[in-house]
Amino acid sequence: MLQEWKRFLADEAGAEVVEYILVTIIVLVFTILSFVAFGQKLRELLQQILALLGQIPSTAQ
């Protein structure tokens, strides 16, 4: 039993997966925080872009 425990503690196979998960979580947190901080400004910008696109005359026949 002690040998299995030592082998388990020495095994580093899952370390890369944990690192990728941590990086993903950090990126998600910063993305969410930026949307919270700049959400209203981003919404206004997108509405302005959509309004400008709506003014472009259609050439479809």
Image: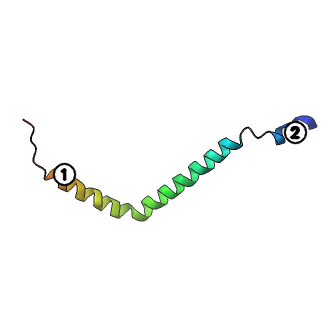
Image vertical order of residue 25 relative to residue 3, above or below: below
Residues at marks 1 and 2, CA–CA distance in whole angstroms: 64 Å
Q: Which of marks 1 and 2 is nearer the N terminus?
A: 2
Q: Are there few (<14), some (14-19), or many (20+) residues within 10 Å of tag 1?
A: few
In this rendering, which labeled residue sits more in front, label 1 or label 2? 1
The quadrant in which the N terminus is found is: top right
Left or right of residue 35, residue 60 in this image: left
Can you tell which mark lies on residue 10?
none
* Circle 2 SS class: helix
Which amino acid type corresponds to the residue marked 1 in the rendered image? Leu
Residue at point 34%, 60% (across, down):
42
Q: Which residue position holds label 1? A: 53
The quadrant in which the C terminus is found is: top left
How many marks the image carries: the answer is: 2
Residue 43: x %, y % from top left: 32, 59
Residue at point 87%, 39% (across, down):
5
Residue 36: x %, y % from top left: 44, 61
Residue at point 29%, 60% (across, down):
45
Work out whether residue 14 or residue 43 is closer to the camera in this orientation and state it.
14
Q: Which residue lies furthest to the left in this view?
A: 61
Left or right of residue 60, residue 31 in this image: right
Left or right of residue 32, residue 3 in this image: right
Q: Which residue position holds label 2? A: 5
